[in-house]
Amino acid sequence: MLKGESIYLRMLEPSDYELTHKWHTDYEIQKMTCGQFRFVSKEIEKNWAMAKSTNNLREIYLAICAIDNDRMIGYISINEIDYIHRSCHCGGVVVGDKEYRNTREYVEAVSLVHDYVFNHLNMNRISGGCLVEHIMSRAEMEGFFYDLEGVEKEAIFKDGKYHDKRNYALMSKTYFEHKSRGDYEVGKTILRIAQNIKKLKYNKK
């Protein structure tokens, strides 16, 4: 278990499928992801949760739980783990519980994953991506000092049109430099994200 100030992360369990099914079928949650919105039955979801909860070599799915009541409020994944090239991909963060849908829970979950990826899995690089118009994701990745590596033109087909995708990466050297300066303190990170959101909304590009 990885523990923060208000949340902790644990391995996804097969019994979590009821909640993940609810979030996977919530269009408001899924509309800004890079994946397609699909109809998912509870039986399909149960099999998905079983597969994710019994595999921790090439991908790791972690439940985000509130410390105050042990409630699962979302999940986060580490995908495409490559132990030779020491790289992995952050598959995204879902905070499905509306009562906890604020920046603090996101920041703590991502911070715990970064610590695990760089200090325990010995990764050198973690990548991430988002739709160009997803201002929140852009603000959050840039708030964690991810570097923009490029834009894939019309890479994602969603809601009847093609969307550009921004690709980011955080290198271990960058992570440890900012970690040593205290830049990843939760309050500082939240402030950077808020500033980024304001800047991106103003620039709109």
Image (cartoon, rainbow, N blue to C red):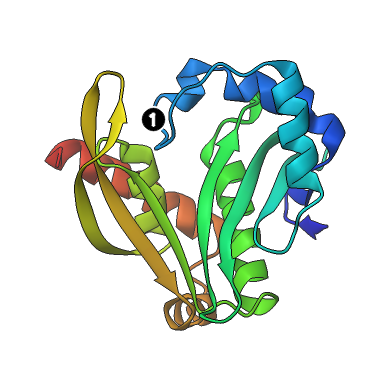
Instruction: Report whether 142 appears left or right of 201.
Output: right
Q: Quadrant of residue 185?
A: bottom right
Q: Position of residue 38 (x, y in %)?
A: 51, 21
In the displayed structure, 44 sits above or below 181; it is above
Observer-nearest residue: 40 or 151?
40
Q: Position of residue 130 (x, y in %)?
A: 35, 44
In the displayed structure, 25 sits above or below 53; it is above
Q: Position of residue 145 (x, y in %)?
A: 38, 65
In the displayed structure, 32 sits above or below 165; it is above
Observer-nearest residue: 67 or 154?
154
Observer-nearest residue: 75 or 58?
58
Question: Residue drawn 37% across and 39% down?
Answer: 136
Q: Which residue is mark 1?
A: 32
For label 1, the SS is loop
Question: Residue drawn 70% across and 24% down?
Answer: 44
Q: Is residue 138 visible?
A: yes
Q: Amino acid at mark 1?
A: Met
Q: Position of residue 121 (x, y in %)?
A: 67, 75
* Mark 1 surroundings: few (<14), some (14-19) or many (≥20) residues within 10 A: some
